Image: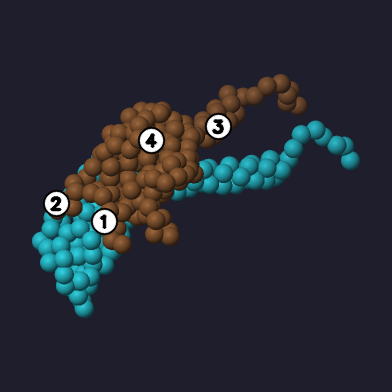
Chain colours: A brown, B cyan
Amino acid sequence: MVKRERGFTLLEIVVVLAIFGTFLWIVVVLTADMRAWEKRMPVNYMTHPQISAVVSRLRKDVEDAGAGYYKDVYGDYHMSDKTLIVYTLQALGTGETVVWDFSKDGEVTRHAFTDISGETSKWTAHGTPTFVITDFPIPGHPDSVRIKAYDKDGKLAIDQIFQPRAH
Amino acid sequence: MEQQRGFSLVEVLAALLVLAIVITTTMAMFVERQKRMQAANETILAYQAIANEIEYRRRVPYAELESAQGTFVTDTAILGPLAPFAATVTVAPPQSNVKVVTLSVRWRNGQRVERVSISRVDTGGSGLW
């Protein structure tokens, strides 16, 4: 009669560790690969509803820009790489001056003015990255606007060119 | 019949089989999710670059479309994470005064490609602007 002892044999332990170690190794490799990929990619801001709304509204304002397109100064605002002043047409054919203010970190504000009524609307998006505005001169057509946004690691996350459309 | 403690070999094998199926399925789902998220994020970057190049190509005179540069003119810094990549522009032969301009971005050794085509019409004049 064989005397049964408590515990496990070395072979049993080795087999269990091998099986467990295989699964653990798979998880480690997948996690490392995922982290390496995430470090390389910029933050996907376009899935953020407020940021995609900023890009969409800005695109609409520039594409519907009217005669004169941009202004260097309007009220207390001055055109710069953090402030865009554009004269845009509305649905009924009237125009309004829109000031896009990117100067405050984490916020983007759109002010709309008319000469008669003053400021008619103000809309602020929150949780936004750092936007920078530049021009993008196309030979013969120097009216394009380029916006870029960088994530906190300095990676370029948004890069869009807009230009007025024909009306 | 005397009841003994423990599990039979068949029971243990069946339990291991079920466990293996569950773990394998979960791992596969995790990997697939990761791949699709990666592909989606890369696609968004590619389309931003393509959209920018479209804005430029819209302003190239109709007669000069074929002779314009065959690679992207706009800055492709946004495509940095996809490197190495190839951003190209091709113009199909004109049909009925319409030229189709196709902008493509290829990466991962050509395994991934995103492309957008725009139609340019010969207005016969100085353009709509």
Residue A101's label in the rendered image is 4
Residue pointed to by mark 2: A139
Q: Chain of mark 3?
A: A
Question: In this rendering, which labeled residue sits more in front, label 2 or label 4?
Answer: 4
Question: CA separation, marks 3 and 1?
Answer: 53 Å
Question: CA separation, marks 4 and 3?
Answer: 56 Å
Q: Position of residue A167 (x, y in %)?
A: 31, 62
Residue pointed to by mark 1: B54
Q: Say what amino acid the circle numbered 3 marks.
A: Phe
Residue pointed to by mark 3: A20
Q: Residue at x 74, y 23 (%)?
A: A3
Q: Are marks 2 and 4 on the same chain?
A: yes
Q: Residue at x 87, y 37 (%)?
A: B2
Quadrant of the drawing holding the N terminus of chain B: top right
Residue that sits furthest to the right in the current view: B1
Q: Say what amino acid the circle numbered 4 marks.
A: Asp
Question: CA separation, marks 3 and 2?
Answer: 64 Å
Question: CA separation, marks 1 and 4?
Answer: 27 Å
Question: CA separation, marks 1 and 2?
Answer: 15 Å
